[in-house]
Amino acid sequence: MQEARHDYLTGLPNRKAFGIRLNIAMDEYHRSGHKFAVLFIDLSIKLFKYAYGHSAVDKVLTIVAKRLKECIGSHDTVARLDGGEFTILLTQIHGLQDVQQASDRIIKSLRQPDCTVVKISSSIGAAISGSEFAKPDDILDAAYKAMCAARKPGNQS
């Protein structure tokens, strides 16, 4: 039996599929120097779930997944890791400006009103490929840590 590689709710690639694509991007970076970036997005849905229930959270997650897909290029990957955690692999970047532009599009999209969604907060962290990342998990961890730093009080995301 083939192992599932897509999230049942959103249809997005799951953690395993994202890991495979991240490995490919890392190999390409080591071979040719083509830069890539990983964005880690966390939605604050815990209180929303308590107030509105699982089905409402499922609806929010599917809307967010659709919006994230609309924010990236066809060569990039959006994945749902778990709960309200999403990752994005940007594979055709030249530097920080490209990552900032993608992040700005995502933030703007997630702030758009929707008659079926109440306001939820999100945090985004990013890491760009570089020699300091020996393994794919290293860059994913760096993006996660950047997201955690963005989540701290006083930071805007």
Image (cartoon, rainbow, N blue to C red):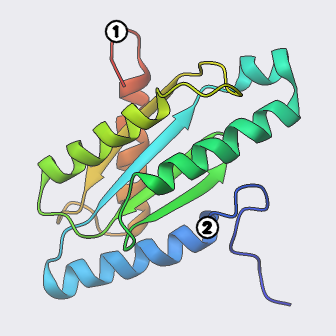
Looking at the rendered structure, the kind of residue marked 1 is: Gly
Looking at the rendered structure, the kind of residue marked 2 is: Pro
Q: Residue at x 38, y 49 (%)?
A: 39
Quarter holding residue 136: bottom left
- Label 2: which secondary element: loop
- 18 lies left or right of 7: left
The residue identified by callout 2 is 13
Between the C-alphas of marks 1 and 2, the distance is 32 Å
Q: Quadrant of the N terminus?
A: bottom right
Quarter holding residue 94: bottom left
Residue farthest top in this picture: 154
- 143 lies left or right of 54: left
Q: What's the mark number on residue 22?
A: none
Q: Residue at x 32, y 75 (%)?
A: 26
The residue identified by callout 1 is 154
Q: Nearer the viewer, residue 67 or 146?
A: 67
